[in-house]
Amino acid sequence: MNIIEINQLTKFYGKVKGIENVSFNVKEGEIFGFIGPNGAGKSTTIRTLLGLIFPTSGSAKLFGKDCIEFGSKIRSEIGYLPSEVFYYEKMKVKDLLKYSASFYKKDCTKRINELSEIMELNLNRRIEDLSYGNKKKVGIVQGLLHEPKLIMLDEPTSGLDPLMQQKFFDIISEENKKGSTVFFSSHILSEVQHLCNRVAIIKDGHVIKVEDIKTLREDNYKKVTVKGESLDSNLYSFEGVSQLTSFDHMLNFFYKGDVNFLIETIGKQKVQDILIEDPSLEEIFMHYYK
């Protein structure tokens, strides 16, 4: 079953393009990454899915229901953490979370306390006294207190220190194990690589690739390093080689093609060492953006 179904989704702000003809599905129970730099269209897609803004054209469904027509009914099953969080400054954290919990037909007190303890969030402090990182913790607890079936995260770790980031990842992994589907938008590729099963790459409002992370790495260019005393870089001027650099008796390049031909070419020279590896997600990402 698909929890999220997006078909040719388009949003223009007047004449300014937010997203155009975006299409992909997110399966039940997966952690789906949505990556691209700031301004690529990630937040526009999420806000349209949540019914916070209306699409110019196209359609989107959550839990098999149109996200605009049935938005008020399906939002109770969604946990949302925006990239920026804003609250009533004079409220105490516990009062804000109690107010948020009142929208759901369940007692969320135990879950609020559990999450607050994990994230080291002081429930008795006022919002105005919190740092940006602690306000983000409030957002995390608020988004997860009702144990939603779909968790939508928009740049969730900004403001969190590395220790809190890891605790947050552990929480999300645990929620996923319990059955929640996670939609994870980020421009920090190491986060996506660490957590997600599949990923969509968005560029200038268009999705240019949707793929399993493992497949994305295996089917892409190989990263090659050749070390030797007298290497001739001209020997590697053939189809499939890109981004060739030479430094300190070492050649570095990306290659896509017949590995046997590559090995045969390398064997024409005396080398000290060879390393052929899958590129990082960041290197793949930069390749698509070039």
Image (cartoon, rainbow, N blue to C red):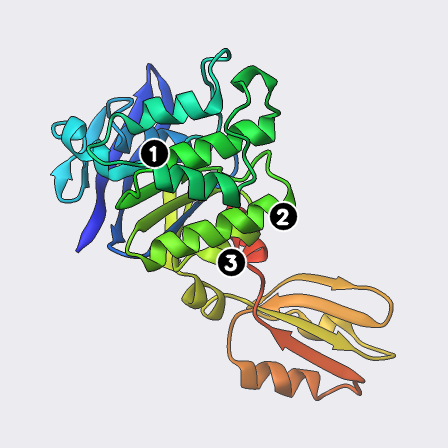
Residue under numbered circle 3: 194
Separation of marks 1 and 3 at Cα, in angstroms: 21 Å
Observer-nearest of 73 and 218: 73
Q: Which residue does the image show at 36% across and 29% down from the upper left?
A: 44
Instruction: Where is residue 189? Give x, y as percent.
Output: 54, 50
Q: Earlier in the sequence, mark 1 or mark 2?
A: 1
State the quadrant of the N terminus.
Answer: bottom left
Residue under numbered circle 1: 46
- Residue 193 is left or right of residue 74, and the answer is right
- Of tags 3 and 2, the one toward the viewer is 2
Residue under numbered circle 2: 163
Instruction: Where is residue 35? Give x, y as percent.
Output: 46, 45
- Of tags 1 and 3, the one toward the viewer is 3
With respect to residue 242, does 222 lie above or below? below
Q: In the structure shown, which secondary structural element does the residue marked by tag 3 occupy? A: helix
- Of tags 1 and 2, the one toward the viewer is 2
Separation of marks 1 and 2 at Cα, in angstroms: 27 Å
The amino acid on which the numbered mark 3 sits, given as a three-letter code, is His
Q: Residues within 10 Å of mark 3 (few under 14, many from 20)?
A: few
- Residue 135 is left or right of residue 104, and the answer is right
Observer-nearest of 98 and 21: 98
